Amino acid sequence: DTAVSQTPKYLVTQMGNDKSIKCEQNLGHDTMYWYKQDSKKFLKIMFSYNNKELIINETVPNRFSPKSPDKAHLNLHINSLELGDSAVYFCASSQAPLGETQYFGPGTRLLVL
Amino acid sequence: LAKTTQPISMDSYEGQEVNITCSHNNIATNDYITWYQQFPSQGPRFIIQGYKTKVTNEVASLFIPADRKSSTLSLPRVSLSDTAVYYCLVGDMANTGRRALTFGSGTRLQVQP
């Protein structure tokens, strides 16, 4: 059973396109996160939702828009993709917000050409 | 936000004990210290978490001195399968506020036979 799943696993697209990444967790957790990992392996939090409410919104371009239709899902939509958006995007979840043990998904590898 | 510093890489041999130290000089009173392990093409996985002194589980031990400005992850008798990147994370356990979580740069551990 997959605890945190992401789709797609790989995403190759052209600059200027709009794309979405989906995340689902079946752990019954209240909090979900999006992280970005660049080529140097730095892992940086982008957004966090708790019970469908945005609780963390780091300094991220407004081309990135998260959406949580329910507690089990957190999607990430990216408008007007740029070369610098190429990275691995990880979704994670935890029972409670901020600091609790997080469970990560397998990642979505985005390559913008 | 508490910033963390870790060695970029470490090498070891099978059967040895490995100690990875993380510096977090600006750690706040409410911050906990969490370590994650990441294998290639996978999301990070929780290893251990602590607030002060020593914590031990079936995987590792975590040593935290009284001033809490650093912490040391200890892996007893490593094997080849422990080759991974290890992240130190310092964050706030509070349920309120928008305190973000900061991952360290990660330490790449290479275990040789």
Image (spheres, rainbow, N blue to C red):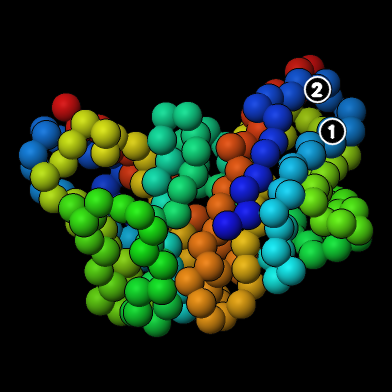
Q: Secondary structure at mark 2?
A: strand
Task: Give the vertical position of B30 relative to B35 (above or below).
Answer: below
Q: Which residue is mark 1?
A: B18
Q: Residue furthest left?
A: A16
Question: What is the quadrant of the C terminus of chain A in the image?
Answer: top left
Q: Secondary structure at mark 1?
A: strand
Q: Is residue A112 left or right of residue A72?
A: left
Q: Residue furthest front?
A: B26
Residue B99, image x, y percentages: 53, 67
Residue A2, image x, y percentages: 45, 60
Question: Badge 1, how many Cα within 10 Å: few under 14, some, many 20+?
Answer: many
Amino acid type for the residue under numbered disc 2: Ser
Amino acid type for the residue under numbered disc 1: Val
Residue A56, image x, y percentages: 41, 67
Residue placed most toward the observer, A41 or A69: A41
| Residue name at image x 18 percent, y 53 percent | A63
Instruction: Find residue A105 and report its image quarter.
Output: bottom left
Q: Which residue is mark 2?
A: B12
Task: Give the vertical position of A24 relative to B89 (above or below).
Answer: below
Q: CA distance from mark 2 to mark 1?
A: 7 Å
Residue placed most toward the observer, B61 or B9: B9
Residue placed most toward the observer, A83 or A20: A83
Tell me the subunit letter for badge 2: B
| Residue name at image x 32 percent, y 70 percent | A73
Residue A15, image x, y percentages: 11, 34
